[in-house]
Structures are given as structure tokens and as C-alpha cells.
């Protein structure tokens, strides 16, 4: 037979478990938000680098045309 915890102890365990769950849920949401923000930043950086590369290619084409 399993030992039965006194009501106060059982209530304390339940409160602690609920607090722990809420902390974990909050931390997980914060982590997900941070991760999403990081992904957005990476996408923007990749787009910026792509735009810069396209501009450089166009500059190079112009330079070649002028030299011809």
C-alpha cells in the first residue's frame, strides 16, 4: 500500500508542481520567441546579403560594359 501524504504536504507538492509547470511553460514560450526572432533576423540577413550580391553583380556588369 502506498504511503499517504498529509494534506498540507500534498497541497505543497501540488503548488510546487504547478509553479514548476508554469515556470517551464513561461521559459519555453520565451525560448520559442527568442528562436523565432533569431530565425527572422537570419532571414533578413540572408536577404540583405543576397541584395548586396545582386548589386555587386550589376556593378560588375556595368564595369565590363564600360570597358568594352
Image: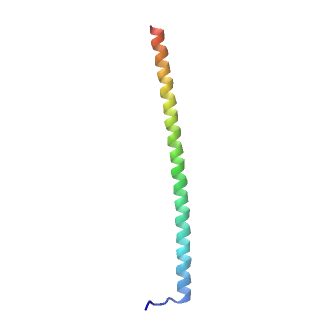
Query: x, y percentage for residue 28?
Result: 52, 60
Q: On screen, 39 above or below 63?
A: below
Vertical position of residue 32 compared to residue 49: above or below: below
Name the image quarter holding residue 68.
top left
Provide residue 34's location: percent of width, then percent of height.
53, 52
The residue sitting at 47% across, 22% down in the picture is 57
- State the quadrant of the N terminus: bottom left
Q: Which residue is depicted at the point 54% across and 79% down?
A: 14
Rendered view: 28 above or below 49: below
Furthest-left residue in this view? 1
Q: Give the image location of residue 60, x and y in percent.
A: 46, 18
Q: In this view, does 68 lie above or below 48?
A: above
Task: Tell which residue pokes out farthest to the top in this image.
Answer: 68
Residue at 56 percent of width and 83 percent of height: 11
Which residue is depicted at the point 54% across and 67% down? 23
User: How is the rendered protein coloured?
Assistant: rainbow
Tell how many labels.
0
Q: Quadrant of residue 8?
A: bottom right
Q: Position of residue 66 (x, y in %)?
A: 48, 9
The outermost residue toward the front is 1
Amino acid at each position: 500500500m502506498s504511503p499517504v501524504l498529509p494534506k498540507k504536504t500534498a497541497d505543497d507538492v501540488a503548488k510546487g508542481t504547478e509553479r514548476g509547470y508554469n515556470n517551464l511553460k513561461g521559459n519555453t514560450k520565451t525560448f520559442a520567441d527568442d528562436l523565432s526572432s533569431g530565425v527572422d533576423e537570419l532571414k533578413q540577413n540572408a536577404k540583405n546579403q543576397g541584395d548586396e550580391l545582386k548589386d555587386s553583380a550589376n556593378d560588375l556588369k556595368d564595369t565590363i560594359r564600360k570597358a568594352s
